[in-house]
Amino acid sequence: MNPRDEMVLIVDRANKVTGSVPRHEMRTKGLPHRASYILVFNSGGKLFVQKRTMGKDIYPGYYDVAAGGVVLANETYEESAKRELEEELGIKDTVLASHFTFFYEEGRNQVWGRVFSCTHDGELTLQAEEIETGFFAAPEAVLALSGKEPFTPDGIYVLQRFLKGKT
């Protein structure tokens, strides 16, 4: 199935389910939806940063601190996180820690996100359609780089809030 035709779970501004529509309709109309965000660390505490391909429907070519994506119709945040980790990075059967749920709005992007994290030291298999390249870096270095390079704004919000909760 073409990603633009995936059926996305639609919610209201209170995060209550209102139905589902194809992804392209959700983007065109700027409908509120749910998404999973997974911060992938290695055992040394470095965070995986990915560079999005130019074919992405939002923030093409930007760096992103989180794997993840939209929650599909009839899917939970947790199911979305596990599916996205496997699709984007080839990570299967890993323990996910759940951290917080948040609402983020920027332009026509209205998203209720749930943040997870995991530790992974194995091989990564990058999904060519979505990820151009990636690297591990200390979270503080990632935040510094975000001042010089384009990063997804919701991803930076997630990382800043995650780090604030760790102090």
Image (cartoon, grey):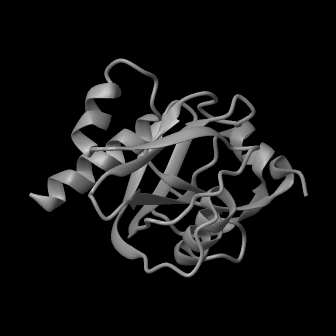
Residue farthest toward the top in the current orientation of the protein: 148
Residue 101, above or below 110 = below
How many marks the image carries: the answer is 0
In percent of width and height, residue 18 lies at 65, 66
Taking depth in this image into account, of 125 and 88 the one nearest to the observer is 125
Image height of 22 relative to 27, above or below? below
Q: In percent of the image, x 56 and y 82: which residue is there?
A: 93
For the point 52% across and 45% down, the residue is 110
From the viewer's perspective, tell me whether residue 73 is left or right of residue 70: right
Q: Position of residue 134 (x, y in %)?
A: 53, 41
- Residue 50 appearing in the image: no
The quadrant of the picture occupied by the C terminus is bottom left
- Which residue of the protein is positioned furthest toward the left in this rendering? 167
The residue closer to the viewer here, 120 or 74, is 120
Quadrant assignment, res 143: top left
Residue 115 on image: x %, y %:
40, 63
Quarter of the image for residue 165 reads: bottom left
Q: Is residue 90 among the parts visible in the rendering?
A: yes
Q: Which sits in the foreground, 41 or 57?
A: 41
For the point 27% across and 59% down, which residue is it? Answer: 44
**Which quadrant of the figure contains the N terminus?**
bottom right
| In the depicted structure, whether residue 88 falls above or below residue 157 | below
Residue lying at the far right of the rendered structure? 1
Residue 155 vertical position relative to residue 149 in the rendered view, above or below: below
Q: Residue at x 76, y 43 (%)?
A: 129
Residue 95 percent across, percent down from the top left: 44, 80
- Lateral position of residue 7 relative to residue 66, left or right: right
Is 70 displayed left or right of 99 in the figure?
A: right
Left or right position of 5 against 19? right
